Image (tube, rainbow, N blue to C red):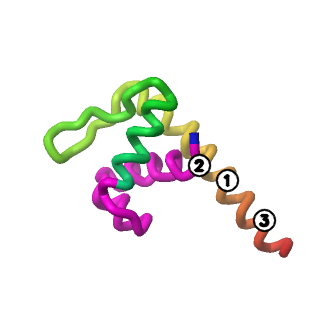
Amino acid sequence: MNIDHIETFVYVVHLGSIQKAAEALGLSQPAVTARIKTLERNLGIHLFLRKGRGLILTAEGETFVPYAEQINNTYQQGKKILKKES
């Protein structure tokens, strides 16, 4: 599992779209999709149901959201503190 995959998941959840997350992260849509699929493989669950061009969080995805947000927030806080120290 990679922190970038978790960050990408959080972006997709909050922006409600792979395309919007890709734009916000400066990535291509296929790169975002690949990160989500890798995260799903690593967790052994589906985080989203694909409905045409849209996404719906699965029950497992809903359960994972607060943990992913906590991991992402902790990582971002750590980076911020390290930048202040250098």
- Do the CB atoms of the residues marked 3 and 2 lie less than 8 Å apart? no
In front: mark 1 or mark 2?
A: 2
- Do the CB atoms of the residues marked 1 and 2 lie less than 8 Å apart? yes
Image location of residue 42, percent across then percent down = 51, 31
Q: Main secondary structure of the magenta part?
A: helix
Q: Which residues are magenta?
A: 2-30
Quarter of the image with the C terminus is bottom right
Quarter of the image with the N terminus is top right
Name which residue type carries label 1. Tyr
With respect to residue 53, does 76 lie above or below?
below
Category of crowding for the residue at label 1, using alpha-carbon neighbours closer than 10 angstroms: few (below 14), some (14–19), many (at least 20): few
Image location of residue 50, percent across then percent down = 23, 37
- Mark 3 and mark 2 lie on one chain; the one further toward the N terminus is 2
Instruction: Using residue 5 as the reference point, say whether residue 21 is left or right of it.
Output: left
Query: Measuring 57% from the left and 37% from the top, which residue is drawn there?
Result: 67
Q: Which mark is residue 81?
A: 3
Which residue carries the number 1 mark?
Answer: 75
Query: Measuring 85% from the left and 72% from the top, which residue is drawn there?
Result: 85
Which residue carries the number 2 mark?
Answer: 3
